[in-house]
Amino acid sequence: AERQIVSQLHADVNELQRKYDDIKQEAVSADGLMKLQKQADIKALQDENHVKGQLLQRVTHEHEATRKKLDEERKRAHTLSIQVEVLHKSLIKQQDEQTRIAALEQQIQSCTSDFENEKLDRQNLQIQLNKVLRELRKARDQITRLEPSKLPERGGCLEVLDNFQAAFEDKLVIQDKHSSPKRISLLDESFLECPKCKTQYPTSQHRELLAHIDFCTV
């Protein structure tokens, strides 16, 4: 009976040892699996971190490129704004120049018109002067042919000469009164000349010219 009990105990110990070995083997296997799983998890996490790092680096590069592009666009917009301002000022200046040129053209046209009018006035004065001079010569010729006994008549002829000169001066005075200040200024720049000695006098000094002619043609 004791042997049977001992045998049963050995059998139980052997069974327990077998179960222990099985459990130990399972534990070793489980530990191996856990290590493999852990290594796999670590590898997956490293891969994920690597991918995330690459993504972060790419996003950082893209952000930097976008920032540089934005800075370039801002500089370009600033340059364009300056060019637009310059063009705007140039346009305003050009408009002012066109306005000034138009005013100058109008002044030139007005001066040209005044000069043409003055030219016509001078021509008319020269015609009147020549007419009076012909009358003066004619009267002087008549005086030269007079005999000494006809001195009263000579005095009458001199009176005629004075009347010619006074009438001519009256015409000039009337024209002076109707002349604008600008045309009077232009008359000072034009000249009438003595038909004998060609001495020139400003048109506004016609009286001095008549006095000169009276002296020069004696």
Image: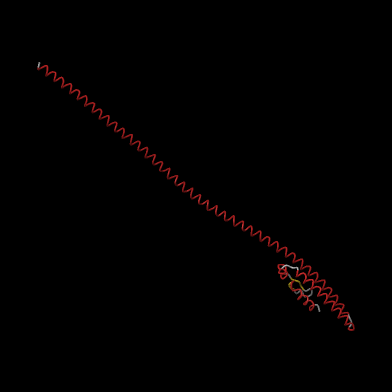
* Vertical position of residue 96 compared to residue 8: above or below: below
Q: Is residue 38 left or right of residue 73?
A: left
Tell me how many marks there are. 0
Q: Which of 4/53 is in front?
A: 4
* Vertical position of residue 74 compared to residue 112: above or below: above
Q: Is residue 83 left or right of residue 58?
A: right
Q: Which of 169/108 is in front?
A: 169
Where does residue 85 sit, x and y in percent of width and height? Answer: 55, 54
* Vertical position of residue 69 compared to residue 199: above or below: above
* The N terminus lies in quadrant: top left
Residue furthest to the left:
2
Q: Is residue 207 left or right of residue 55?
A: right
Quadrant of the image occupied by residue 200: bottom right
Colour option used: secondary structure
Quadrant of the image occupied by residue 170: bottom right
Where does residue 79 sit, x and y in percent of width and height? Answer: 51, 52
Q: Which of 53/81 is in front?
A: 81
Quadrant of the image occupied by residue 216: bottom right
Residue furthest to the top:
1
Q: Is residue 200 left or right of residue 71?
A: right
* Vertical position of residue 64 compared to residue 43: above or below: below
* The C terminus lies in quadrant: bottom right
Where does residue 203 sit, x and y in percent of width and height? Answer: 75, 71
Where does residue 65 sit, x and y in percent of width and height? Answer: 44, 45
